Image (cartoon, helix red, strand yellow):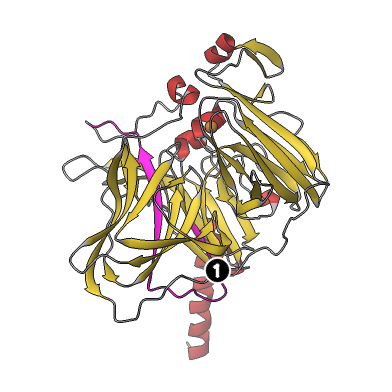
Amino acid sequence: MTQSRRTFLKGATALGAAAAMPPRMGWAQNTGFSQIAARPASMQLAPEGYAQTDVWGYDGIMPGPTIRVAKGARVQRQFVNELPQASSIHWHGIRIDNAMDGVSGLTQDAVEPGQTFDYDFVAPDAGTYWFHAHNQSVEQVARGLYGALIVEEDEAPDIDQEEILLLDDWLINPETAQIDDYFDASHDRSHAGRNGNFITTNGDYQFSSDVKQGDRLRLRLINASNARIFVLNLAGLDGWVLAYDGMPLDAPEKVDGQFPLAPGQRVDLFVDVTAEEGEVAYLLRTLDEQLLPQAAFPVTARSSGATRGAPQPLPPNQSERISDLSSATAVTLRMEGGAMGRLSTAILNGEEMTFRQLADANQFWSFNGVIGMTDSPLASLSRGELVRLRIENETRFPHAMHLHGVHFREVLDDGQLGPLRDTLLSFAGRTTEIAFRADNPGKWLFHCHMLSHAEAGMRTWIDVA
Ligand code: C2O
Ligand code: CU
């Protein structure tokens, strides 16, 4: 047999083997797709000595793998559902192509177990974002289906170290260390939502990362919990807020005392380590007047560089400045219901029901008198329309209202506009106004990010033609 013939045969055999192989799910790889699979996993969540906790994670880890791309880059992920229930992925905070927003029941069908969905979108804005399950979210996010999505600035800012910190709380059985699977608990749904009894940062209840005195850290904080409003504080760290919900502030704000981080919200901090070598700097949380470590930063050395002074702002993402709201379309969202609320009746599935009947259906919250998604949107907008949305919180609870697909600004009391955000903390009994330009066409969900509240009625949507 000649050399060339042997080579040919070898080639033919290899080809034959490839052709006989079942089509692989990752087949689209050469077009830039890689897979992200949701599946059950277990991890040491509770302290040593406790059993491992069964969680659901992306690629079998919790938090899921960090997705990190350049500003303006395309993200291509084939989602593979290896869970026992249908799922989808939402890319929280991205000004995304509507078809890729991942809201099962609105922008796509939920992906059934064993099935896949190709997510393919551009990440137009630098900043700190996250992704999470968006089907039966109250269960799927609680089981761990989330991860960070980082879009880098064109030019890297001047920092020494970066920490992506996903804050979460877990409701786990202290004996078995397993996740409490009573996700429909009517008490959670009608009160403050599902609050956990075990608090973690990146799945670690004693998260720690070594730092140097004098170094500047960028902390990317993401609240991935179902309902907890983290109240945070710094110790041994001199900090500035550079961005909220991914969007840079015009001028960094000095951190002065405690600050809240509601479910779904992010904040980018630059912090300079002021604690001495041998000490520990902290991100702290306030709980019942107590200050507890949320993340520890042991100071193991001194920085060689000079201290920097106040940071420069991050480069802005969006250029439009809304200045005149006089032509804005006015929309009102009245939120009612919940425990101790005044809701007497509301429409559920087209029928007027008493609060008692609603409670029997495990539904508690209404938007403009209606519970849950409606056929017609809260607002039908034409592309480019300016909107002034009034949110009247007539409940006894705070709500973290998240609008998909667009960032908005709060209209402050003096008429000025606040920073760009995608999730607004609305306080009990208060009215807040937000303004935004409806420049992204599609069906955009607007809901409470206290996920039990969303399941129990607090969901609506806007339509941008
Ligand atoms: Cu972060 Cu509709 O979700
Ligand atoms: Cu709520």
Question: In the figure, residue 310 lies in which quadrant?
Answer: bottom left
Name the residue located 18 percent from the left edge and 46 percent from the top edge: 48
> Looking at the picture, does residue 137 appear above or below residue 267?
above
Name the residue located 46 percent from the left edge and 48 percent from the top edge: 146
> Looking at the picture, does residue 312 appear above or below residue 135?
below
Whether residue 407 is visible, yes or no, is: no
Residue on which the image places disc 1: 314
Q: Secondary structure at mark 1?
A: loop
Residue 332 lies in the magenta-colored region: no
Q: Which span is picked out in magenta?
A: 149-174
Q: Position of residue 373 (x, y in %)?
A: 67, 29
Is 110 on the left or on the right of 163, as rendered?
A: right
Q: Position of residue 64 (x, y in %)?
A: 42, 53
Is 362 on the left or on the right of 255, as rendered?
A: right
> Looking at the picture, does residue 81 appear above or below residue 282?
above
Q: Position of residue 86 (x, y in %)?
A: 53, 38
